[in-house]
Image (spheres, rainbow, N blue to C red):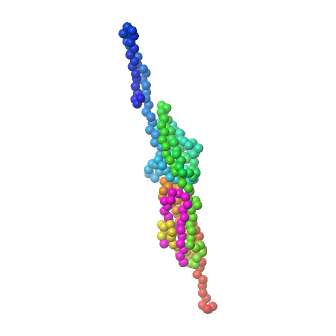
Amino acid sequence: LSESISFTCTVRDTDNHSFEVTSPLIVVNPIPEANAYIEANGTTYKTYNILAGNQVLLSMNDIAGATYSWEPANLISNFIQDNHRIARTIDLPENDNTEFTATVTTSSGCINEDNLIVIVHKALDESYISASSIEICENFEVTLTAHPDGGTGNFSYHWTPEEYYSDPYSQTTNVYPNVNYNSYSCTITDEGIDDRANNRITKEIDINSLEKPSVNPELI
């Protein structure tokens, strides 16, 4: 049945007398709309990429009087609303993907469900910077390379302070260390991660810049 309806039955006896019996109204309640999503960056996602160790807010469309539940329950840390429409995950461990199922139950007892997927990539913690030399004479060139480890593989780079580098936005760049500044840093950003607040890491490397030796003319 797709709409509320009542039925009428006509009863006729052997003498051809008849009468009608009408059933009570059968109320057919609609199946609720179910739409699970993650809202971020001004859009909604059904599949969402994060780095391991971060949380996600999971949401369902709002239906008056409805209650909600989420599975797997062991990956939910708490709920933002009393009806459990918005759930916060735990710090999710590294995994290929995790499928969350949200179930909505209306006040009339009608049920529907929807799914979304969170893909959890390895964190960037093991990323590092290498140098062609970590000890060099002042104002000699050193080549620095950022080595991302983890994530989706879609990286951008930002070396700071920018004025020290031949190309502050390249994975590999050159720098001329001096005795007044010997710490160099690169922020590695994973552009494939949808969680823009937690998609980067900054790594540093120290280069020991040696002063040029002085020459005493009297000793020549």
Looking at this rendering, what residue extends furthest in the right direction? Answer: 219
**Quarter of the picture holding the C terminus:** bottom right
Tell me, yes or no, if residue 81 can be seen here: no
x then y, percent, for residue 176: 53, 75
Residue 2, given in percent of the width and then of the height, sits at 40, 30
What residue do we see at 49% from left, 32% from top?
A: 109
From the viewer's perspective, is residue 149 above or below residue 142?
above
Instruction: Locate residue 3, reporting x and y percent.
Output: 40, 29
Q: Nearer the viewer, residue 147 or 13?
A: 13
Residue 90 in the image: above or below residue 29: below
Which residues, given as a range, are shown in magenta? 139-166
Residue occupying the point 50% across, 70% down? 173
Q: How many marks?
A: 0
Residue found at the far top of this picture: 15
Q: Is residue 202 above or below residue 84?
A: below
Q: Is 218 in front, or is 13?
A: 13
- In this view, the residue farthest toward the front is 14
Residue, x 48% and y 49% (percent of image)?
47
> Dividing the picture into quarters, in which one does residue 123 lie?
bottom right
| Position of the N terminus by quadrant | top left
Indicate yes or no whether the magenta region holds residue 117: no
Q: Is residue 11 above or below residue 179?
A: above
Q: Residue at x 40, y 23 (%)?
A: 6
Residue 156 sits inside the magenta stretch: yes
Is residue 24 visible from the viewing direction of this image?
A: yes
